[in-house]
Image (cartoon, coloured by chain):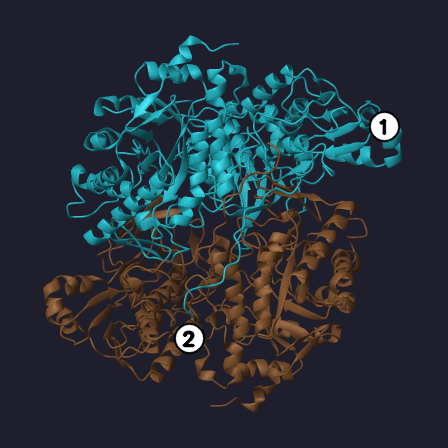
Chain colours: A cyan, B brown
């Protein structure tokens, strides 16, 4: 296949001040939890995107000075020469592939936690939270912070960076704090009118441009719409567009985004999950920008479809395809489009698991791309595989869920002589088939689509659906290596902390699988969902039941509905939406018993009993592995030997139920290491540790 | 002064297997968020305690293998030679001072998050939480984990460690998971009877002892009482004592603790705050141990009083004074007792701010000891100060709260020619005077006591109470350097996010200061406390009002009462106690308006209005700095010059209201850097960063 000429426009160069993007693909800044503290992982992850065709790669938000320390959240930093030295390899790797490297300069103003540096946080106004103070900067303080931006910009330039981004999106940066009318209560020339509120940012841009603008492209990441009605909202219309007009002469292009990521009370959402919006949903906000600027416009939109991209460029809405999540799911997205290999695109599913690691200060992961974050430490390339040392072996992979599909794919890529992927269902996908049929999670089906296409292309892999194998069937199948990926099921007896739920055997009690199969149309008017899992399944149950016209009460021991979604950034909107849709949410409560008329329980902090009336109960407590087959198959080592089975492995949920991303990873990992000395345990990975130093300061 | 002979017993050596503790002071394992990743800070922090007289220093919990990765929480690690190399300097520093170094070996079993290593967590049973799986280990898996302990123990020995602790306290380790009947549902020889449940730990001890027991002392950190009624409790009686009997031949001493730190549903408390218990409150549990063991007993009890310590040893209850928090508040506690310098002891206040940084993955801090964690990076010694380069200057410190007291103390230690500490109140302490009078916070008054004594000892420091200075008074005072530490006050108008609360001006609306001054005896029967701050003040208000016989409702936008106390480990017990005492707690709700009959508001996730009836309202929204004096004093630079004032600085809450610990730090920092080029901004500190590496694995 070759490229459709409609997409040629995506490969036109875009001049940005003193630099030129070699095509229209721009990896927008996104977090990794690597920063400058895990420099090799940082460089290799970003460098992979340059190799994959992105014309620019960017750091995550990058603190300009110790007075803005985001710990425990991990930003990049340009505090000193050591930071610059650690970020420089990323720029070098960009250049190796003809790409540009950008740095997203950030100062947190009054909301920086400074848990590491212990400096009082100064910002636009005076506000406190949990004893972490923020104080109102005087003019000397403003000058000082602007000076930090300049120093950091110079360090970035000297480290080889091509683009300096004076960041103000997502509600976390001092530039935006000054701009936002609801956060800026100043009565001096930095508060009041739009011109005044824009002054801090514009002066900073002026100073940065004067310092490095001849050598670096200068841009500003701007939020053009915050969605929420909270105290920090800026209005999309005159405010954002007005700022663009005021600052247009100072930037070489605009880096635009909508939605803010911030504390619970005021947050909108930044990386908007596919459950909420389709590709380029912000188009209506971005379209209005053209009239306010003479500069190229880059904007994000979870772009994965080259038709959408090309049309948006052709229509004049944007000039540059900015993308964070799509570049994580497929670092080679531009190259695949360039080469017309559309079927190989691994599309982002918009689940935001990538984003969920940042608030946990943990390395980035991805549901679609098991290699992200593993480029350096495990030496994994998303598109290249080494032939396996034991490639002559035949492999049976039983269970075509996320782990099984991915394992079969990697084993196929590694050239195993024959890989059979067997599943009892009529199509591959396993648990993802059910999950992607949940309300609003349709895009999660891309986990299956990508793998289905890849598996079809692999001559050594055979997909065998509609086939149930018992232990005897596995033992006599004829494979030398057996990989069991038989998944998990929701506990039918409502087990939590090893205790089954009294009453779980009643007819009015349902499993998530049962509710999903019935499309929510179960018996009874009023349904109580008991959600201990506190991620997407409880929400899906509520949504299915609401769609079926039920009265819904969700009881959860978590302090919020869908607690994990506060990591993925879905929590704010989901908690509002489900209530607005009519569900009653009871947080902080345990259910201790179910009966034909409802359930009994208590507040987690108090023994007083509480009762809830309901006609039916859905138990979303925990998943349990379907591992009996593994035990049966491995029970008799002599029998295995007699059947010529050299190894039996298990992967994914049937080991321990976990995130889809971790199941994909588990399958991928086994495939990558099928020829290691002991594939049951991952090979050690390269670590990045500092060395002990002797204190040199006076003591 | 010289040592009281009653305390001589504390300085007797204690043989522990192949090693000997030089005295009875043992720094028990505690977290720092340094681990092996910040090796210099780790070594210097622990080494300072060896210098201060502790006969043994220990790491925090130390993972034995990548299959137990605690990220984002920071443990030490002994996964490989790099970790060993990074922990070895700590052992060297212990030896320099004649002390021993211990390592607390840990494997998290099925509850390890493994967010960094991505290995499925195997443990005693099958349980899931938020998609993070834990699977039931088979016997091969058990052997493998035991082998990891042995390998880590050997690495510790080779790195110079003297004590190997097979840790099982606080509910987080696989050893304890096997032991706890409520977590162990196995039907094999590792489940059921106490002997069976103890088997995993005992076998591990056997193997570790066989590997390193000739060269290292072997111990086990054991929780002898979990307090809570949750599913993971072990009973203090036959269970813990029974285990001690079973394992007694395998340890060289016992390292005992009570309380567990774990997930919300089952947690008791580990480091018990002074609000709950006095010194050595666990004595009754520890006393019963003597009959079960022939080995020395070390136990913690927030020991700061040498009389309590000596009596507990003399009574035969314990042999070794184990301490974490007291060793943080005063690394020189043993030496001060040894030298009879009792008045110099900086007693732990039991606020648990130290512990609050670990769940935030941030470096340890301490309310009493501003130098903890700063030993390496800022080169601060808790007991030594360099003469200031500008020591000839005179200093006025206005405001004798935590920042002002500490700053005056440090300036005095640094030999400034004259330091006047002036305060309008009749005694020093500032905000800590009010706070330490809150129910159950009496020990927080130690912040004042220590500084009062030290200030009295400093001939160059004069404390001047009962003196109010206005700007004119400051300007004409005659000091060359002015330090303003005028504190903060609770917002009287109920400001949140810059908006005052409608109705805040009503007579029925009270400030925390007002309620504190009235001892809770305000008008009205039913009082609503609106707590946005969500730390100790809201709790104190509720407690004061309950004591005064009021009906109390606490409304908070936080998902829990006193959200910050989930970092300090107080949250679980406080949330239960306040409810049990009769307060009604309404979480997740905003108050938007107060009136004479109560307040109106809404759920944070829903616009539907909610009303609460009340006769009075207390607004705990945010504190605002008392900084008008700073602005007045600095308004006219010419006047300053004319008056001979060379510098005006401000510190503590009057810059930005924050934790008491951070105010103490801020005052200390200014004192340490009063002679730096720009004391308004901290000097750069030494950082610990790894270097970029080139990937060597196949790609």
Read off the chain for label 2: B
On the same chain, marks 2 and 1? The answer is no
| Residue B199: quadrant of the picture | bottom right
Vertical comparison of B464 with B122: above or below: below
Vertical comparison of B39 with A490: above or below: below
Residue B518 visible in the snapshot: no
| Left or right: where A91 falls relative to A166 | right
Q: Nearer the viewer, residue A49 or A450?
A: A49
**Between marks 2 and 1, how big is the CA–CA gap?**
72 Å
Name the quadrant of the C terminus of chain A. Answer: bottom left
| Left or right: where B618 falls relative to A369 | left
| Left or right: where A626 falls relative to B273 | right
Whether tag 2 and tag 1 are in contact, CB under 8 A, the answer is: no
| Left or right: where B538 falls relative to B247 | left
Residue B145, x across and y down, in percent:
72, 50
Specify few, some or many for label 1: CA neighbours under 10 Å numbering under 14, 14-19, or 20 or more.
Answer: some
Residue A626, x across and y down, in percent:
71, 33
Identify the residue under disc 2.
B384
Q: Residue at coordinates 35% horizontally, 77% vertically from top-left?
A: B413
Specify few, some or many for label 2: CA neighbours under 10 Å numbering under 14, 14-19, or 20 or more.
Answer: few
Residue B352 visible in the snapshot: yes
Read off the chain for label 1: A
Secondary element at image label 1:
loop
Q: Nearer the viewer, residue B170 or B36?
A: B36
Nearer to us of marks 2 and 1 is: 2
Residue A54, x across and y down, in percent:
43, 26
Vertical comparison of B641 with A504: above or below: below
Identify the residue under disc 1.
A644
């Amino acid at each position: 296949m070759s490229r459709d000429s409609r997409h040629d426009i995506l490969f036109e160069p875009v001049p940005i001040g003193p630099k030129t993007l070699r095509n229209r693909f721009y990896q927008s800044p996104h977090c990794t939890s690597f920063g400058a503290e895990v420099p090799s992982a940082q460089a290799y992850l970003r460098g992979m995107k340059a190799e994959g065709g992105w014309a620019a790669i960017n750091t995550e938000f990058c603190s300009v000075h110790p007075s803005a320390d985001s710990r425990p959240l991990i930003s990049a930093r340009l505090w000193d020469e050591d930071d610059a030295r650690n970020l420089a390899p990323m720029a070098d790797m960009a250049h190796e592939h003809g790409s540009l490297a950008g740095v997203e300069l950030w100062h947190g103003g009054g909301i920086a936690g400074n848990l590491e540096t212990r400096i009082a946080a100064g910002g636009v106004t005076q506000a406190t939270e949990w004893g972490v103070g923020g104080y109102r900067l005087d003019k000397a303080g403003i000058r000082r912070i602007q000076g930090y931006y300049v120093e950091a910009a110079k360090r970035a330039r000297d480290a080889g960076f091509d683009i300096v981004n004076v960041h103000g999106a997502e509600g976390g940066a001092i530039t935006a704090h000054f701009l936002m009318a609801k956060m800026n209560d100043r009565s001096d020339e930095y508060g009041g009118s739009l011109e005044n509120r824009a002054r801090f940012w514009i002066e900073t841009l002026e100073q940065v441009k004067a310092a490095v603008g001849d050598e670096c492209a200068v841009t500003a990441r701007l939020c053009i719409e915050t969605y929420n009605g909270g105290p920090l909202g800026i209005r999309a219309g005159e405010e954002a567009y007005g700022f663009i007009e005021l600052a247009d002469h100072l930037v070489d292009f605009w880096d635009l985004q909508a939605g803010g990521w911030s504390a619970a009370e005021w947050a909108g959402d930044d990386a908007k999950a596919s459950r909420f919006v389709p590709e380029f949903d912000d188009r209506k906000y971005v379209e209005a920008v053209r009239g306010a600027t003479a500069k190229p416009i880059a904007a994000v939109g979870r772009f994965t479809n080259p038709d959408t991209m090309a049309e948006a460029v052709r229509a004049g809405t944007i000039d540059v395809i900015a993308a964070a999540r799509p570049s994580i799911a497929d670092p080679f997205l531009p190259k695949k489009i360039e080469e017309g290999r559309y079927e190989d695109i691994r599309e982002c599913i918009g689940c935001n698991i990538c984003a969920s690691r940042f608030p946990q200060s943990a390395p980035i992961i991805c549901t679609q791309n098991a290699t992200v974050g593993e480029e350096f430490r495990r030496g994994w390339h998303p598109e290249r595989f080494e032939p396996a040392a034991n490639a002559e072996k035949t492999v049976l992979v039983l269970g075509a869920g996320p782990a099984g599909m991915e394992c079969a794919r990697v084993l196929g890529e590694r050239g195993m002589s024959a890989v059979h992927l067997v599943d009892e269902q009529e199509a591959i996908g396993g648990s993802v088939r059910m999950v992607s049929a949940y309300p609003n999670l349709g895009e999660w089906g891309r986990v299956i689509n990508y793998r289905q296409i890849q598996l079809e292309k692999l001559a050594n892999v055979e997909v065998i659906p509609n086939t149930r194998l018992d232990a005897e069937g596995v033992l006599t199948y004829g494979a030398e290596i057996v990989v069991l990926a038989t998944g998990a099921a929701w506990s039918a007896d409502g087990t939590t902390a090893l205790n089954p739920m009294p009453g779980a055997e009643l007819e009015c009690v349902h499993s998530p699988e049962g509710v999903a199969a019935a499309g929510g149309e179960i018996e009874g008017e009023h349904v109580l969902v008991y959600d201990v899992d506190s991620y997407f399944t409880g929400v899906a149950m509520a949504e299915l039941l609401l769609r079926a016209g039920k009265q819904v009460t969700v009881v959860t021991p978590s302090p919020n509905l869908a607690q994990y979604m506060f990591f993925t950034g879905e929590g704010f909107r989901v908690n509002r939406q489900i209530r607005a849709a009519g569900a009653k949410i009871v947080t902080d409560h345990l259910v201790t018993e179910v009966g034909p008329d409802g359930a009994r329980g208590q507040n987690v902090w108090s023994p007083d009993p509480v009762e809830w009336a309901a006609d039916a109960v859905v138990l979303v407590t925990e998943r349990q592995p379907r591992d009996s087959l593994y035990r049966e198959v491995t029970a008799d080592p002599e029998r295995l030997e007699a059947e010529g089975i050299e190894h039996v492995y298990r992967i994914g949920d049937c080991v321990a139920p976990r995130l889809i991303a971790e199941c994909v990873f588990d399958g991928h990992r086994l495939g990558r290491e099928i020829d290691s000395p002991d594939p049951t345990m991952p090979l050690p990975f390269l670590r990045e540790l500092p060395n002990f130093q002797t204190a040199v300061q006076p003591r």
